[in-house]
Amino acid sequence: MLTMSDELILKLSCPDRSGIVRAVSGAITELGGNIVESQQFGDTSSGNFHMRVETEHIADPEGFRHRMQTLGGALEMNWEINRKDRKIRTVIMASKEAHCLSDLLYHTKEGKIPIEVSAVVSNHEILRPLADFYGIPFIYIPVTKETKPEAEAALLEVIKDADAELVVLARYMQVLSDRVCEAMAGRIINIHHSFLPSFKGARPYAQAHARGVKLIGATAHYVTPDLDEGPIIEQDVVRVKHSDSVEELMSQGEDVERRVLTRAVRWHAEHRVLLNGSSTVVFD
Amino acid sequence: MLTMSDELILKLSCPDRSGIVRAVSGAITELGGNIVESQQFGDTSSGNFHMRVETEHIADPEGFRHRMQTLGGALEMNWEINRKDRKIRTVIMASKEAHCLSDLLYHTKEGKIPIEVSAVVSNHEILRPLADFYGIPFIYIPVTKETKPEAEAALLEVIKDADAELVVLARYMQVLSDRVCEAMAGRIINIHHSFLPSFKGARPYAQAHARGVKLIGATAHYVTPDLDEGPIIEQDVVRVKHSDSVEELMSQGEDVERRVLTRAVRWHAEHRVLLNGSSTVVFD
Amino acid sequence: MLTMSDELILKLSCPDRSGIVRAVSGAITELGGNIVESQQFGDTSSGNFHMRVETEHIADPEGFRHRMQTLGGALEMNWEINRKDRKIRTVIMASKEAHCLSDLLYHTKEGKIPIEVSAVVSNHEILRPLADFYGIPFIYIPVTKETKPEAEAALLEVIKDADAELVVLARYMQVLSDRVCEAMAGRIINIHHSFLPSFKGARPYAQAHARGVKLIGATAHYVTPDLDEGPIIEQDVVRVKHSDSVEELMSQGEDVERRVLTRAVRWHAEHRVLLNGSSTVVFD
Amino acid sequence: MLTMSDELILKLSCPDRSGIVRAVSGAITELGGNIVESQQFGDTSSGNFHMRVETEHIADPEGFRHRMQTLGGALEMNWEINRKDRKIRTVIMASKEAHCLSDLLYHTKEGKIPIEVSAVVSNHEILRPLADFYGIPFIYIPVTKETKPEAEAALLEVIKDADAELVVLARYMQVLSDRVCEAMAGRIINIHHSFLPSFKGARPYAQAHARGVKLIGATAHYVTPDLDEGPIIEQDVVRVKHSDSVEELMSQGEDVERRVLTRAVRWHAEHRVLLNGSSTVVFD
């Protein structure tokens, strides 16, 4: 690959009004930059405007930040500028199942997801060899009803030490407390093993089997205190047959789960996902 | 097409036990028949066995029926024998939207669905020209809260006159009473404009838009008195984007709805769908 | 629907350089316009830049055209401005099969494709009732080896009389001469009944059956003198089984063909398709 | 999981005639067996009949084999009986790319594919750590134009030592000689990184990019001396965009390749794939 050192990604959200694209593209041009890729979306129902721009040749990124600060103040923007080649500091949590963790670590190692994984945290020991294989620190934090507060304190410590920007729940089978959800709002991605809002809660494949659905799915979403209700990033499905048992649904579901989660984490890390009320804009 | 006059389709369901396939295939062979296609499924969770066989060269269909009567008594079978070239007498109901009705009539006319449509029943006049184009009698039965009992009586009269074996609700926007549901149990197919069990009830596309799902779907199911809970025959989905409005979801959804309903009706009419408790076996 | 009378769509292609987005968005803002939706793509391999912008509130569309003329000259642009509510004048050609023509006319009538169909031209009489049902003039132009030049002259006359901007070959089973292809370059859309470049030429379903493929597809593309080699607009596939005969492949393929062609025509008519060498950019 | 020790899988192919199902199901019933699952397909174009049966409770598998030997002789059958819990002895070959090998080893370890991998053979050293992680012997057999005959001799030795029933080419980038292809006819599965028959030969993603296709795919097939022409077992596709570079097509293609290959190997190992002339019957 080429060096991407001067490529910057700007993403922004603000109330829609005339002149936003002009102002932003004007700033980029004046700083000597070129727009490589750009996407916009004005949501007429919420009145919000969302934009993602990839630029090259901006010699002075700090200057760009200053321009955006002025612009952002005037236009009530949430905005963020990231270097394209900077990897997002990430903690992955898992329990006993390997498929999602394995897929994330594989694609990260291959350079397909721009994250650096600071640690794998688990409430079981079973996935330690997998983390070892990829050379990632594995931190065992067991959780019982009684020790949950201490366990979460330990988790927050790990997140703090790693200065983590993102936490990925790769089939982590514990519900996080509101405290953690709020501390990391918009920065925790979970994979739910159903096509939400179908089959919320526990044992979704058993529910799907009982209902006799013809497709099963998985949903990657940001975690909010309201369980299984956070903004959806990505979903996909796979066709199943009447002869598939609950175990076979689970087995087929794993393939969808890992693909959906890997895609969601990649899009997040490439700054393609913008919150839009209770849903998301994905500039894929 | 060739004449298919001696092709028969047997479908059966019974408690699973040893020797069913042998008994059935033995009967077919002894009657000079050949098995063209055959599928079986033993559901280990319910203990039920399901089978569909296409035969040719059985010179004496009545003899086959007698054999199956004996066999069916001994093995507690639900069974049915149909000539492959016999078309299922069908009444289609619709309201204002044309897409499902249009697709059903088109494919029926082209010989792709083995049904003969006795009548199109609607609570609006708007689809009359479409029925006219295909030469199908159009029966206008308006429904108000007050006239619902009379309207349903009129509908049952139409069904009786046509000796209809199947009623298809092609986006018919009235809820049928329990009386009609029970009179035609297992013989009314509805298309629900969501990926059930997500978004039951009214305005599913508006619900889907509000929840920010990334795929929308449609579900064809048998109608039971328990609304939106009948056994599912077929489902499918289509990918949508953050920029799609509710209207655009509806528009995209139409294409999924018509495909799912057309497929479900075809499978039913080809005797491929067998009830298995609250779900279905589909030998596609 | 609301009136869309002041919505304009600009599409443009030009050699990539710094400042294009700024210049275009600047012009729009100065004319009092607002950008509703905008997509860009800079193709690093060809060095071309492509852009599609939907605007509202530009009171003076002619002023916009003048600005673009100046800009377009300076930046070597191919550009086009269309009112969003203007329907594209279209001639559809078909032979004997109804599925593509039927789907196009249905969606056009329902307001889902912004075209107005001036005429259906066919080398057979069989589809006349379908055109009649939708109130579209049906023009029968038979073609034999001997009469091909006259037939094509008659066709060009129809196109000229209708001032047609688009010709859609909806399973029209005659090869157009280079003369027609060139006269309407980039404005004839064909549906090929295979997943090109697999199975070019005649009888693609028979070829697919012989090869034992597990998916069959369809391809909508612009027509060029080089048969089956024009820029691809859209493709899709459907899964088939070992038990499907050639006839069943054809039957299943019809559903893919009509969907792919309808989508391609809609995208073209919404000014979403831009030529990029021998392929296309689709801002869907 | 339960013990599956008495479950047997019979697969057979023979010229179609009356009475096959009866004869086979009769034999099973007489031996005290029960049919758990059964699928048949009579190919009217080739005149061949194919069948796969899963049985339980046959106390005397050797007796079953004897019955099938008699039957098979009389009916000109190719048949095979396997215990359901027996794992297929397999050698996997790969070059530098990890995605297919990684997916196969992961699913094998998780018990999702009934194979036991005797060895990973590669013409490069790069994948050794991956084989080590899964505890599989890694055998490095470098290949140059000059050493190809020795390399293939070494490979055949590995196959012989392992008594391998199956060789999987998991992105092995060397063409096998006719000698190896013939020695293992019907027992070598390759993954081709295109939707065959599109883009045969080298660099299919570059070809796909140049042609501007809207979907890319992968094909798992049995290897024959006729390159890229062997019977297809499974295919799948993924949608791509105009903005995807050749590298991005490759990256997206990897996900399809690994899924298609893993599925094909699983189906083969579950005795679901039967050769039918130049194509396959897949009882999935």
Image (cartoon, coloured by chain):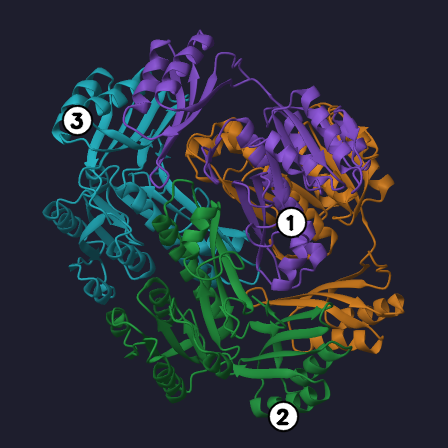
Chain colours: A green, B purple, C orange, D cyan
Q: How many marks?
A: 3
Give the answer, above or below, for where B238 lies relative to C169: below
Amino acid type shown at disc 2: His
Q: Is residue D78 visible to us here?
A: yes
Task: Give the x, y percent position of residue D60.
Answer: 13, 30
Q: Nearer the viewer, residue C4 or A179?
A: A179
Element type at mark 3: helix
Q: Are marks 3 and 1 on the same chain?
A: no
Q: Of the numbered discs in the image, which one, if any, rests on residue D64? A: 3
Q: Residue at x 76, y 23 (%)?
A: B135
Chain name for mark 3: D
Label 1 environment density (alpha carbons within 10 Å; few <14, some 14–19, many ≥20): many
Q: Amino acid at mark 3?
A: Phe
Q: Which residue is mark 2?
A: A66
> Which marked residue is nearer to the observer: mark 1 or mark 2?
1
SS class, disc 1: helix
Q: Is residue A126 left or right of residue A192?
A: left
Q: Position of residue D273 (x, y in %)?
A: 31, 37
Query: Which circle, 2 or 3, is nearer the viewer?
Result: 3
Q: For mark 2, give the secondary structure.
A: helix
Q: Residue at x 56, y 59 (%)?
A: D241
Q: For the residue marked with disc 1, what is the amino acid? A: Gly
Q: Position of residue B268 (x, y in %)?
A: 54, 30
Quadrant in which residue C250 is drawn: top right
Which residue is identified by label 1? Answer: B253
In this rendering, is residue C77 above or below B60? below
Query: Can you see residue C149?
Result: no
